[in-house]
Amino acid sequence: MTAAKPTWNRTDFGAMTTNEPCSAVYLERSLDHWLQYLEHSDPLLRRLGAHALSVIGPEGGDKAIHALTAALDDSQSFVRVWAAAALAHIDPSQQRALDILIAGLSDSQSFVRSLSAWHLGRLGPNLPGIEEAVPILLEMLQDADPSARAEAEVALKAIQADNSHSRNR
């Protein structure tokens, strides 16, 4: 009997994953490797570390949760947003992660507002407390930045479509 070939799927964050058991590895690098990225001096590498931990997911365990929680205090708002999205993806009960994402919707940088809306839309309507983001997302429909407006609209559709569907059940 031949072994079944792994099937590949896209995660919420666009990375490819397989149905085979994960050993807390992303791009052939260990969890510890990505944890070190969260402490790097380069904020782009810190963001990459947060993304990698999100893809590794719950198999990162407490080490990933603690590192991402610490990254919620990063000096760069876009790193905080990526860390919050990763933390919410791994452990949706983390209210502080949702708070950071919602705060990102009002950031002075349009990129961060757009990014926060993007993550909220992809985390979806089942994230506990996500309805708290709806009023700010509605305000963002008038944002001066077209990308922020577009991501707010997509996020609202993702959040509200499923919520209205579940109310009709």
Image: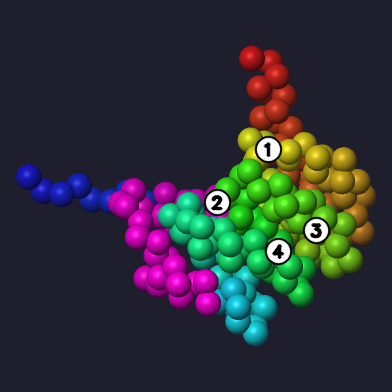
Q: Disc 4 vs disc 3: which is toward the camera? A: 4
Image quadrant holding the N terminus, namely top left
User: Residues under labels 1 and 3: Cα distance?
Assistant: 18 Å
Q: Which residue is mark 2?
A: 90
Task: Work out how far the residue at label 4 is from the one at label 3, CA to CA, in angstroms.
Answer: 12 Å
- In the rendered structure, does residue 12 fall within the stretch colored magenta? yes
Determine whether 49 is above or below 107 in the image.
below
Q: Label 3: state its secondary structure.
A: helix
Q: Quadrant of residue 22?
A: bottom left
Of mark 4 and mark 3, the one earlier in the sequence is 4
Labels 1 and 4: the sequence-earlier one: 4
Q: Nearer the viewer, mark 1 or mark 3?
A: 1
Residues rendered magenta in the picture:
9-36
Q: Secondary structure at mark 2?
A: helix
Q: Residues within 10 Å of mark 2 (few under 14, many from 20)?
A: many
Between the C-alphas of marks 1 and 4, the distance is 18 Å
Q: Which mark is residue 57?
A: none
Q: Residue furthest bottom?
A: 41
Q: Residues within 10 Å of mark 1 (few under 14, many from 20)?
A: some
| Residue of label 3 | 104
- The spot of residue 46 in percent (x, y) is 62, 74
Could you tell me how far apart the alpha carbons at marks 3 and 2 are, in whole angstroms? 19 Å
Mark 2 vs mark 4: which is more N-terminal? 4
**For the point 73% across and 38% down, which residue is it?**
129
**Amino acid of disc 3:** Gly
Kind of residue indicated by mark 2: Ile
Viewport quadrant of the C terminus:
top right
Q: Position of residue 86 (x, y in %)?
A: 60, 57
Asked whether 157 or 159 is in front, the reply is: 159
Q: Amino acid at mark 4?
A: Leu
Residue highlighted by disc 4: 72
In the picture of the structure, the residue carrying the numbered disc 1 is: 128
